[in-house]
């Protein structure tokens, strides 16, 4: 350092000043002036600008995984979870199937139940489309009667079923409400049709489960023209086992299976009516910052 | 030095000094004449002071009160869980409490996110399934009307959740601007975002309000 100083900055008291010392000192002065000018301009700019930052705002998602109990007069059936479905093979008999929210953090959802290659869908479990907890909607309980070993697969699906192309009509035999009876024991079994009744005669027809989405709108805005995103082919996952052990717990640990899923149906659309029902107008007041799902 | 050379030098110096004196006399005379034939008013009072630049940004709580925002303020509800059809609205207010007008704009960015697994065993990111929007209003009532119903809020929140900036708006001293930030999950989002396992899908949003003095 001293060598450098003597070389470039030293000014002798009684001697001649070297040219490079003079140049170096002049250059240092100019550099310091330029730096000060920059600092002054940035300071002036900063003085007359201002940023307000809100820290990390965390947004999280809920999940829906129905708690399912299947039992008959003698014992409870344990369903096997193979990733997305909960499956079981039911011997002949009459079964009470109960679907509840369980530990799900989502407020609402429904289930798609595949019975012998026919897809049924349930009413909303949790709150209904109007965000009301009506009688029976906290869980869905129905009766299934089979005359031979029958495989059932149950898929928990979040959201409102009418948003995925499932019609909300009471006379649709594929629509399961609480207290419904699905009777597969009569001759309809032979041609693959089921009889879904509420204690009344059902139509017992076999229809496609992937009905086109209802596009009824009240506002005249763009309809949600999305295909249901839960149309997984029934042949992609096989039940691993069926047991009749007298336990009631249902495994909810996920396993990875080969998915066949459509692209996210996250289209932007305004409200559509839920099938034949008109969605009540939701009021978002000024104060609350959170809203429940539809 | 020879006396002739000395004399020449002295002569040059004297001539240069005379020339300078002549120029100075000319400038003084001209300046004095101009001053004699012009007048100025002494009533102008010029006061120079630094402008007071002050921006206040606050958010509205559930109780309806406005609270200031700093770097640690979370304006979105951390406990809210998004599912299809869920809509969350937060309200911001920007005030010009200083003496000079400024231009401001609001930026929203995704600062962090986690990967999760859905029902089908696929990985997904939550922000791919969320929609976002900002409504700007001049009064609080106008802002409330813009997001009064779910349908209106859905119409505002149409953009994918990523980096977004509002247009630059001007705010004069004493003026206030209101903004409603809407984040929603469209009700058509299916099981591809219904997660399984212990990894909860999350998105972290950063919100910046930047104000610059007008030029």
Image (cartoon, coloured by chain):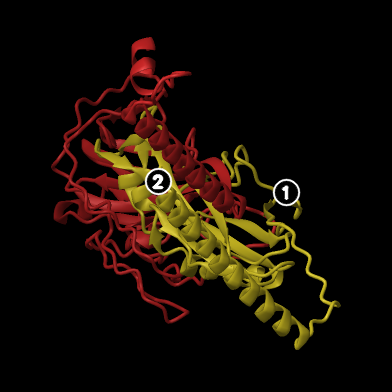
Chain colours: A red, B yellow
Quick check: A130 above or below A114? below
- If you read the primary sequence from the N terminus, does the residue marked by circle 2 or circle 1 appear first? 2
Quick check: A284 above or below B192? below
Quick check: A54 above or below B21? above
In the picture as drawn, the residue positioned furthest to the top comes out as A2
Residue at (39% x, 76% y) in the render: A216
Q: Report x, y in % for residue A41.
A: 52, 50
Dot 2: element: loop
Q: Report x, y in % for residue B128.
A: 33, 50
Left/right placement of residue B107 relative to residue A212 reads right
Please name whichever residue, A117 or A279, is drawn nearer the observer in this view of the structure: A279
Can I make out residue A246 in this image?
yes
Distance Cα–Cα, label 2 vs label 1: 92 Å
Question: Disc 1 marks which residue?
Answer: B67
Dot 1: element: strand
Q: Which numbered disc covers residue B22?
A: none
Q: Quadrant of the N terminus of chain B?
A: top left
Left/right placement of residue B145 relative to residue A16 reads right
Chain of the residue displaying label 2: B
Residue at (41% x, 31% y) in the render: A25
Q: Report x, y in % for residue A28.
A: 42, 34
Can I make out residue A62 in this image?
no
Left/right placement of residue A263 relative to residue B20 reads left
Please name whichever residue, A87 or A34, is drawn nearer the observer in this view of the structure: A34
In the picture as drawn, the residue positioned furthest to the bottom comes out as B37
Residue at (48% x, 42% y) in the render: A33
Q: Report x, y in % for residue A97.
A: 40, 39
Question: Disc 2 marks which residue?
Answer: B2
Please name whichever residue, B116 or A227, is drawn nearer the observer in this view of the structure: B116
Chain of the residue displaying label 1: B
């Amino acid at each position: 350092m001293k060598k450098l100083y003597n070389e470039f900055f030293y000014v002798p008291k009684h001697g001649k000043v070297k040219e490079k010392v003079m140049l170096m000192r002049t250059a240092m002065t100019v550099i310091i002036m330029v730096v000060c000018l920059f600092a002054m301009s940035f300071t002036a700019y900063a003085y007359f600008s201002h940023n307000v930052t809100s820290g990390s705002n965390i947004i999280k998602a809920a999940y829906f995984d129905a708690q399912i109990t299947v039992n008959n007069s003698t014992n409870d059936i344990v369903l096997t979870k193979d990733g997305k479905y909960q499956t079981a093979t039911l011997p002949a008999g009459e079964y009470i199937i109960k679907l509840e929210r369980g530990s799900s953090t989502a407020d609402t959802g429904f289930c798609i139940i595949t019975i012998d290659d026919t897809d049924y869908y349930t009413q909303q479990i949790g709150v209904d489309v109007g965000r009301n907890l009506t009688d029976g909607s906290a869980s869905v309980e129905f009766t299934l009667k089979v005359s031979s070993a029958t495989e059932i697969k149950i898929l928990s699906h979040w959201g409102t079923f009418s948003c995925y192309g499932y019609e909300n009509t009471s006379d649709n035999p594929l629509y399961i409400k609480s207290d419904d009876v699905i009777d597969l024991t009569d001759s309809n079994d032979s041609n693959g049709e089921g009889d879904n009744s509420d204690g009344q005669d059902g139509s017992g027809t076999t229809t496609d489960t992937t009905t086109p989405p209802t596009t009824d709108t009240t506002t005249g805005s763009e309809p949600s023209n999305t295909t249901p995103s839960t149309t997984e082919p029934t042949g992609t996952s096989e039940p691993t086992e069926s047991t009749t052990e007298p336990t009631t717990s249902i495994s909810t640990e996920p396993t990875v299976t080969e998915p066949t899923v459509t692209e996210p149906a996250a289209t932007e659309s305004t409200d559509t009516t839920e099938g034949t029902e008109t969605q009540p107008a939701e009021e978002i007041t000024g104060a609350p910052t959170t809203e429940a799902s539809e | 030095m020879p006396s002739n050379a000395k004399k020449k030098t002295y002569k040059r110096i004297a001539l240069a000094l005379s020339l300078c004196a002549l120029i100075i006399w000319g400038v003084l005379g001209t300046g004095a004449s101009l001053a004699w034939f012009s007048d100025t008013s002494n009533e102008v009072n010029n006061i120079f002071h630094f402008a007071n630049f002050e921006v206040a940004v606050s958010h509205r709580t559930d109780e309806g009160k406005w609270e200031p925002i700093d770097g640690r303020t979370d304006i979105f509800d951390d406990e809210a869980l998004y599912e299809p059809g869920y809509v969350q609205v937060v309200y911001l207010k920007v005030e010009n409490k200083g003496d000079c007008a400024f231009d401001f704009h609001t930026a929203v960015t995704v600062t962090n996110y986690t990967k999760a697994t859905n029902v089908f065993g696929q990985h997904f990111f939550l922000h791919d399934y969320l929609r976002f929007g900002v409504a700007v209003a001049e009064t609080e009532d106008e802002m409330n009307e813009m997001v009064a119903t779910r349908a209106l809020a859905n119409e505002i929140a149409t953009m994918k959740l990523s980096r977004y900036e509002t247009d630059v708006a001007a705010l004069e001293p004493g003026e206030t601007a209101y903004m409603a930030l809407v984040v929603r999950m469209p009700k058509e989002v299916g099981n591809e975002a219904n997660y399984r396992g212990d990894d909860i899908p999350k998105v972290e949003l950063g919100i910046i309000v930047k104000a610059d003095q007008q030029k």
